[in-house]
Amino acid sequence: MTLERLHVDNHLLALVKPAGEPVVPDESGDVSLLERGKRWIAEEFHKPGDVFLGVVHRLDRPVSGVVLFARTSKAAARLSEQFRTHSVRKLYFGVSASTPRGADSGELAQWLVKDPASNTVRVGREGESGALLARTRYRVVGRVDALVHLELEPLTGRPHQLRVACASLGAPLLGDLKYGARDALEDRSIALHAAELDVEHPTLRTRLELRCEPPAKPWWRSRTEALSRARKGAGQ
């Protein structure tokens, strides 16, 4: 499998994660993006021994898109702090077979509780044991046939945050059987793609903007048409 690189420098490595590949090794034993990234660095820069590559954020296995790794411990610490304080901007694309209830855009605040046994997250209440506040901005960007295209911006970084948000709005993501989708997608992915990631470079202190187009799958191909229809409807 070709390793798609978005950015490489002495401190960072940004890669495209295919849907279905784990970011880090898991119980499946499948090769992870982390392992492939380490292997590429070792070969590209002729580095002997174990290559350092710091994990500062993750994507769920069935999700595709931008993943940023740190190549130095200094970069790892500084990037981790940005993710911890939510100073990183993230934008995801989503596709649903249903229109969100209520307005076509808004912000959702939820208290989320994770069940490690089932690896699912549910909406709880403030003050409940283990409940973490999740804030999500969402916007319908267009509709084509039976598909609704969404842009989702997590203002916090909670497990399954966007998947739960879409389900709570009555618009579960295509293929997301855990959160209300009726059918699986052909490749067992879910229609969620990490399209944009903006961070402060850990040493240059300039803004680094990473962009990644969705994979060539049927449920993504209508996004361009949906955006075009939306612009025409807005008179642009």
Image (cartoon, rainbow, N blue to C red):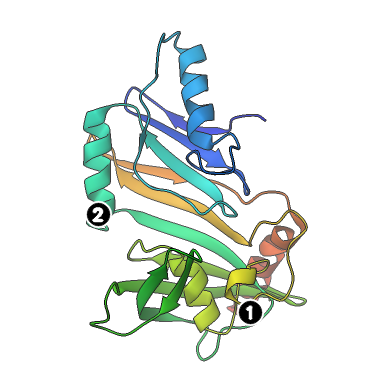
> In this view of the protein, which residue sits in the foreground, 92 or 25?
25
* Residue at image mark 1: 233
* Residue at image mark 2: 84
Residue 75 pos. (x, y %): 26, 33
Q: Secondary structure at mark 1?
A: helix
Q: Which mark is residue 153?
A: none
- Name the quarter where the C terminus is drawn: bottom right
Which residue sits at x=73%, y=65%? 184
Q: Is residue 12 visible?
A: yes
> In this view of the protein, which residue sits in the foreground, 155 or 140?
155
Q: Is residue 236 visible?
A: no
Q: Is residue 60 above or below residue 132?
A: above
Q: Secondary structure at mark 2?
A: helix
Which residue sits at x=71%, y=65%? 225
Q: Residues within 10 Å of mark 1 (few under 14, many from 20)?
A: few
Q: Residues within 10 Å of mark 2 (few under 14, many from 20)?
A: some
Q: Is residue 6 left or right of residue 88?
A: right
Which residue sits at x=34%, y=72%? 134
Q: Is residue 232 left or right of residue 144?
A: left
The amino acid type, in three-letter code, at marker 2 is Arg
Distance of mark 2 from mark 1, alpha carbons? Answer: 39 Å
Q: Is residue 209 above or below residue 204?
A: below
Q: Which of the 4 image quadrants contains residue 76?
A: top left
Q: Which of the 4 image quadrants contains residue 17?
A: top right
- Name the quarter where the N terminus is drawn: top right
The first of marks 2 and 1 along the sequence is 2
The amino acid type, in three-letter code, at marker 1 is Gly
Marks 2 & 1, CB-CB < 8 Å contact: no
Judged from this view, the residue extending furthest toward the bottom is 102
Residue 107 pos. (x, y %): 39, 79
Which residue sits at x=39%, y=20%? 51
Which label sits in the foreground, 2 or 1?
A: 2
